[in-house]
Image (cartoon, grey):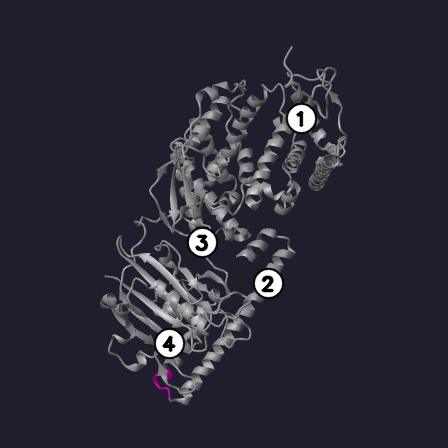
């Protein structure tokens, strides 16, 4: 059975402060010590970090989770867990926090067995009575399923010298005490191989690291799969002219020596991609993941510095009465602190100069990169109702070399490649010989109507949103990595209007389309994608625009009587007010007007919202080209429908002019105002405010008129009865009185 090593350590602090006697990057130093003693999970106390959070030390290989008091409060304690980053993907969830003294981690060992790890930092003698009661009440709730007499302290289970049991020395009495424990169930004590204090662990703290070796195997949450060997090249070298020339010349020589590409399009692509990969692997070389951090970049020097300090510390611990060994350790400790601060200052100075250099040459990309270092069905009847446009019978010409070069130039740099691993920078650096081979490949795809499988496949990567439970799939978002060559090929077809070729090429990109999920370097089995389009595919917006244009033209062809917007706005306004009153808990018995409800909700009426959206969309349409369908609809007139006699044919623009009559925007200068995007947005905001103010004034005036009419006494009316001559005060009263007379 495999072994797992747990630890417990009072690190005194993980904070980085200029006034502290401890060096910077405390987390990195603690991670180095934990890695030296092969700890998988370590419970840390007195972290003194504010609030709750987590951070990963990439070079050290540990991820720290902590919980402390608020930023404004005094942080004299706090707890945390340091876990190996490599085992995080085997855990279904992150540690849960009770408070700044209790933290809990639970994960499965097998299908029916789980392990629960509780990190508890007990209150000291100076803590208030209320804080102690709260802590032990929360602790009892955590371990309520485990009777107290079934727990055992593993520090005392093994026969060993006291120096391997004691964890802290009193600063005045110089007596050693055992105050850091690792406790387990008594029935699980047989799984503990040894628990001892590591006298050689030193990280500017007066507590020793407690280390337990446990016969425990953390089962992976999913079956292991083979890793996806997707090459990654150091394309940053292509920014230098000498490396780029060397790579391009070598690639051209290899393509020339190979000769013309032969075979099917798939075979041609295999030959072409293999040549590009071989040269990219040899000249730019594989990409090395470099994390820009002053501590990691000086790892070798820091490791040597800490090793010297640790040897001196171990020598002093073996002979505590030696003054010279203690002074030697203190000297090396001070030197390590001074050297680390000097390394940090020098690294930041060089980084600031690098950032300033990119800013001076106005290279924004390098400047910011340096800083950031369900199936659906469609009715066939509905599809048949869409009118079919006449096809354009133009000659089916393959893509030209100019189109190839333009497509490569328009491709964004820095995009992650697909399964083939060839990035866009490789294609941009290629010259005429390589481009001719790539052009012949695309022409072969065009003529033979056969796409390589890698052009259709997508590699899906799931990214954690850093919120919620890791076991909830809704807390992840997926992105698709597509072949860069496939994107280039798709760009040639998105502007085509050829009937057969266009449909054929669309089918080539989506027939037999597969995808696989890449997580932690492991790839799932390929699965077939039967509906939808690939994320990031250049043909996806083209298909959407075609379908939307057909639906839009079919929808507006039968409009005769227009749309009754005013009646609809009133209905939506009623629903809006009911929703706001329900959210704010306002009932009709409270006698609160709608204007007060809008003020409390800090929102506007539906009419103002619709006008704002309408004006912004109108400005967008006005700035469109004249051949776009939305702009033609804006200025188009209805060929059928009813209108008042003598009126001109009504346009959608006329409705907009009527809506902005009270907003202060000049209707005659509508097009001129909309051409200025920034000015139009400001005009839209002012128009919305003016409409809302005008509407509020009308509502207030109408309400005041109703109240005045209700409060003003009405003079008595004169309604005489034709039968008996009785005078009634109202017509309704006269009708009621006439019922008493028999009908004649």
Magenta range = 315-320
Q: Which residue is mark 3?
A: 287
Measure the C-alpha gap from mark 4 to mark 1: 79 Å
Q: Which residue is mark 1?
A: 652
Q: Quadrant of residue 445?
A: top left
Q: Compare marks 2 and 3 and give the one earlier in the sequence.
A: 3
Helix, strand or loop for disc 3: loop
Q: Compare marks 4 and 1 and give the one earlier in the sequence.
A: 4
Q: What residue sits 38% from the left and 49% below the top?
A: 519
Q: Compare marks 1 and 2 and give the one earlier in the sequence.
A: 2
Circles 1 and 2: CB atoms closer than 8 Å = no
In the depicted structure, whether residue 196 falls above or below residue 710 = below
In the depicted structure, whether residue 290 falls above or below residue 636 = below
Measure the C-alpha gap from mark 2 to mark 4: 39 Å
Residue 524, can we see it? yes
Q: Which residue is mark 2?
A: 352
Measured as percent of width and height from the top left, residue 423 is found at 47, 45
Q: What residue sits 72% from the left and 29% below the top?
A: 657
Residue 584: within the magenta?
Answer: no
Measured as percent of width and height from the top left, residue 692 is found at 69, 39
Q: Which residue is mark 4?
A: 208
> Which SS does the magenta portion mostly show?
helix
Depth order, front residue of 79/62: 79
Quadrant (top left/top right/bottom left/bottom right) for the N terminus:
bottom left
Helix, strand or loop for disc 2: helix
Outermost front residue = 724
Residue 316: within the magenta?
Answer: yes
Circle 1 or circle 2, nearest the eye = 1
């Amino acid at each position: 059975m495999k072994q797992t090593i747990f630890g417990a350590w009072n690190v005194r602090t993980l904070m980085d402060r200029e006034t502290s006697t401890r060096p910077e990057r405390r987390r990195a130093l603690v991670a180095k010590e934990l890695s030296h003693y092969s700890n998988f999970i370590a419970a840390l106390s007195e972290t003194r970090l504010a609030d709750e959070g987590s951070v990963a030390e990439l070079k050290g290989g540990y991820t720290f989770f902590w919980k402390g008091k608020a930023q404004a409060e005094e942080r004299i304690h706090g707890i945390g867990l340091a876990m190996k980053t490599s085992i995080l993907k085997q855990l279904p969830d992150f540690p849960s926090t009770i408070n700044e003294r209790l933290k809990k981690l639970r994960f499965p060992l097998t299908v029916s067995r789980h392990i629960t790890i509780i990190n508890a930092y007990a209150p000291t003698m100076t803590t208030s009575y209320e804080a102690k009661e709260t802590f032990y009440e929360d602790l009892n709730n955590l371990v309520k399923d485990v009777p107290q007499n079934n727990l055992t302290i593993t520090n005392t289970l093994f026969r060993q010298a006291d120096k391997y049991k004691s964890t802290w020395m009193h600063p005045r009495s110089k007596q050693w005490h055992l105050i850091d424990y690792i406790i387990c169930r008594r029935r699980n004590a047989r799984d503990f191989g040894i628990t001892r204090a590591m006298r050689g662990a030193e990280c500017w703290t007066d507590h020793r690291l407690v280390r337990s070796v446990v016969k425990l195997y953390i089962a992976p949450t999913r079956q292991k799969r083979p890793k996806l060997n997707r090459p990654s090249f150091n394309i940053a070298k292509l920014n230098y002219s000498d490396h780029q020339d060397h790579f391009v010349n070598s690639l051209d020589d290899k393509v020339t020596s190979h000769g013309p590409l032969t075979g099917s399009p798939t075979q041609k692509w295999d030959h072409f991609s293999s040549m590009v990969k071989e040269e990219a692997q040899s000249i730019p070389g594989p990409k090395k993941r470099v994390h820009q951090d002053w501590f990691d970049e000086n790892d070798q020097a820091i490791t040597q510095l800490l090793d010297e300090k640790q040897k001196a510390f171990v020598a002093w611990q073996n002979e505590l009465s030696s003054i010279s060994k203690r002074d030697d350790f203190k000297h090396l400790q001070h030197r390590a602190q001074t050297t680390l601060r000097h390394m940090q200052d020098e690294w930041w100075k060089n980084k600031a100069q690098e950032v300033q250099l990119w800013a001076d040459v106005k290279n924004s990309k390098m400047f910011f990169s340096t800083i950031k270092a369900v199936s659906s069905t469609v009715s066939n009847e509905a599809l048949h109702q869409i009118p079919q446009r006449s096809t354009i019978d133009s000659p089916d010409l393959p893509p030209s070399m100019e189109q190839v070069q333009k497509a490569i130039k328009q491709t964004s740099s820095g995009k992650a490649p697909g399964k083939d691993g060839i990035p866009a920078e490789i294609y941009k650096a290629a010259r005429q010989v390589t481009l001719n081979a790539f052009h012949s490949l695309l022409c072969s795809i065009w003529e033979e109507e056969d796409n390589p499988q890698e052009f259709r496949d997508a590699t899906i990567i799931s990214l954690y949103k850093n919120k919620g439970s890791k076991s909830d799939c809704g807390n992840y978002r997926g992105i698709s990595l597509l072949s860069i060559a496939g994107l280039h090929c798709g760009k040639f077809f998105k502007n085509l209007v050829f009937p057969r070729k266009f449909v054929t090429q669309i089918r080539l990109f989506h027939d037999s389309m597969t995808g696989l999920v890449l997580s932690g370097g492991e790839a799932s089995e390929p699965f077939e994608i039967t509906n939808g389009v690939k994320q990031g595919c250049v043909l996806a917006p083209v298909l959407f625009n075609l379908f939307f244009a057909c639906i839009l033209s079919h929808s507006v062809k039968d409009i005769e009587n227009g749309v009754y917007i005013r009646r609809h706005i009133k209905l939506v306004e009623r629903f809006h007010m009911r929703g706001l009153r329900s959210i704010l808990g306002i009932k009709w018995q409270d006698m609160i007007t709608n204007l007060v409800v809008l003020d409390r909700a800090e929102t506007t009426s539906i009419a103002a919202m619709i006008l704002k959206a309408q004006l912004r969309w109108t400005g967008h349409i006005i700035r469109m080209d004249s051949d776009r369908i939305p702009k033609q609809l804006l200025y188009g007139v209805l060929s059928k429908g009813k209108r008042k006699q003598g009126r001109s044919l009504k346009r959608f623009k006329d409705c907009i002019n009527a809506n902005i009559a009270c907003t202060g925007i000049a209707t005659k200068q509508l097009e001129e105002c909309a051409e200025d995007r920034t000015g139009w947005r400001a005009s839209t905001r002012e128009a919305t405010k003016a409409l809302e103010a005008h509407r509020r004034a009308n509502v207030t005036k109408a309400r005041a008129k109703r109240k005045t009419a209700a409060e003003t006494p009405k003079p008595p009316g004169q309604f005489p009865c034709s039968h008996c001559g009785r005078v009634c005060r109202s017509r309704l009263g006269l009708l009621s009185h006439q019922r008493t007379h028999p009908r004649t």
